[in-house]
Amino acid sequence: MKEKALWINQIKGLCICLVVFYHSVITFYPHLHAWQHPWSETLAKCWVYFNLYLAPFRMPVFFFISGFLIQRYIDGVSWRESLGKRVGNILWVLALWGFIQWQALSHITHWLAPERDVSSSANAAYAGSPGEFVQAMLTASTSLWYLYALIAYFVFCKLTSRAKIPMLAGLALLSVVINFLPTPWWGMNSVLRNVIYYALGAWFGTPLMTWMKTFDIRRRWLPLGIFAFAAVVLWFMRTPLLLSLLSIFIIMKVFYAVGRRFPPSENSLLNVVGSNTIAIYTTHRILVEIFSLLLLGWLSAQPRSPSVELSILLFYPFLSLLLCVATGMLARRLSQRVAGDILFSPPRVALNR
C-alpha cells in the first residue's frame, strides 16, 4: 500500500474497532440486571451512554472514506466493470455472511439461551423462516447493513453523478428528516441517514481532502468553535448531521497530522486492522453474541464476587474487541490460504486465485 494512503487505512481500522465496540456493548450491558458491586449498575450505564455518544464518530467517517476510495469508479470506469468489482464482490459477501449469521445465531441462541425470545427482533439473523430472512435482507434489517449500504450508495452515486449539487442538498435534507419520519425498518433508516457522507466522499472527496489538509485550526478557531457549538445543539435536537460532518473533519485532520509527524508503516496495528475491515465486520457479530450469552449465563448462574463483577464490566468491551479483531484477521488468512478467499470473494474470483 502506498505510504500516502496508510493514514486513510488507519482511519478504517479505527472505524471497524468502533463498530465492534458498539456491538459488544449493546449485546451485553443492557441485559444485566443483578448487581453485586455498588458501582456495577453505574458502570454499565456509563458504557451504554458512552456508546451512544460515539455514534457521530463511527459510521459517518467510515462511509466518507468508503466513498472517497471509489471516486474513480464513479466517472472513469464503465458500468460493466464497476458492477463486477464494486457490486458483485460486496453482494457475494452480503449474501453469504447474511446466511452464515442467520444460521449461526439461530443455533447459538438455541444452545446457550433457549429461553430467550427473539421473535420480536427485526433482524435477519433472528429470522424464523427463509421468507422472513429474505425480507429482512432486502429491507437492510441486518447486522450487515453497512454492506447493503455500500452497494446501494455506489449505484445511486454513479447514476446521479451529473447532478451532484442538487442531489447533495436532497441527501442533507433526507439525513435530517429520517430522524423524525423513520421507515418501518431500522437498517433502512441507517442507510438513508448515512448516504450523504458516502456521496460527499465519492463526489467531492479530493477537493475536501485538499481543503482539510490546508485548513489552519489555530487561525480559524473561532468559526470552527461556532460550528461545533451549533453542531452539538442540533445533536441534542435529534439532528446529528453537523456533528457527524465535524467528526469526519476532526478524525481526518488528526490522523493526517499524526501521519505527517510520525509516518505510519504497513505493519502498524491500525493499518493491519484497516486492511481486514470486511473480515472483521462479517465475523464479529457472531462472536459478540457468543461472548455475551456465555458471560451473562455465567454471571447469572451464581453470585460472583463484587470485585470480579466490576472487573468484567470494566474491561469486557476491550477484551471482546481484541478477540473479534484477532478472529476476523485469522478468518481472512485461512480463507485466502485454504479456499482462495472464497469467504470474502465471489467463487469466480476465488477460483482465479
Image (tube, rainbow, N blue to C red):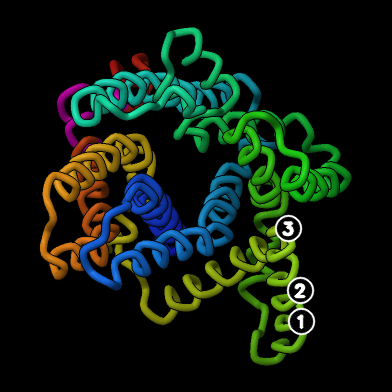
For label 2, the SS is helix
Horizontal relation, residue 241 to residue 53: left or right: right
What stretch of residues is rendered in magenta?
332-343
Q: Which label belongs to residue 230?
A: 2
**Where is residue 303 drawn, in percent x and y?**
13, 55
| Separation of marks 2 and 1 at Cα, in angstroms | 6 Å
Q: In this view, does 158 lie above or below 223?
A: above
Horizontal relation, residue 161 to residue 101: left or right: right
Camera sees residue 261: yes
What's the magenta bit mostly, secondary-structure-wise? helix
Residue type pointed to by label 3: Thr
| Rendered residue at 72%/87% (across/down) | 220
Confirm whether the magenta stretch covers residue 64: no
| Rendered residue at 36%/50% (across/down) | 20
| Separation of marks 1 and 3 at Cα, in angstroms | 17 Å
Identify the residue under disc 3.
239
For label 1, the SS is helix
* Circles 2, 1 touching at the beta carbon (< 8 Å): yes
Horizontal relation, residue 176 to residue 12: left or right: right
Q: In this view, does 15 lie above or below 283?
A: below
- Near mark 3 (Cα within 10 A), the count class, few <14, some 14-19 or many ≥20, is some
Q: In this view, does 160 lie above or below 307?
A: above
| Separation of marks 2 and 3 at Cα, in angstroms | 11 Å
Identify the residue under disc 1.
226
Nearer to us in this view, 270 or 298:
298
Image quadrant assignment for residue 219: bottom right
* Circles 2, 3 touching at the beta carbon (< 8 Å): no
First in sequence: mark 2 vs mark 3: 2
**Where is residue 157 drawn, in percent x and y?**
71, 36
Residue type pointed to by label 1: Ile
- Near mark 2 (Cα within 10 A), the count class, few <14, some 14-19 or many ≥20, is few
Confirm whether the magenta stretch covers residue 340: yes
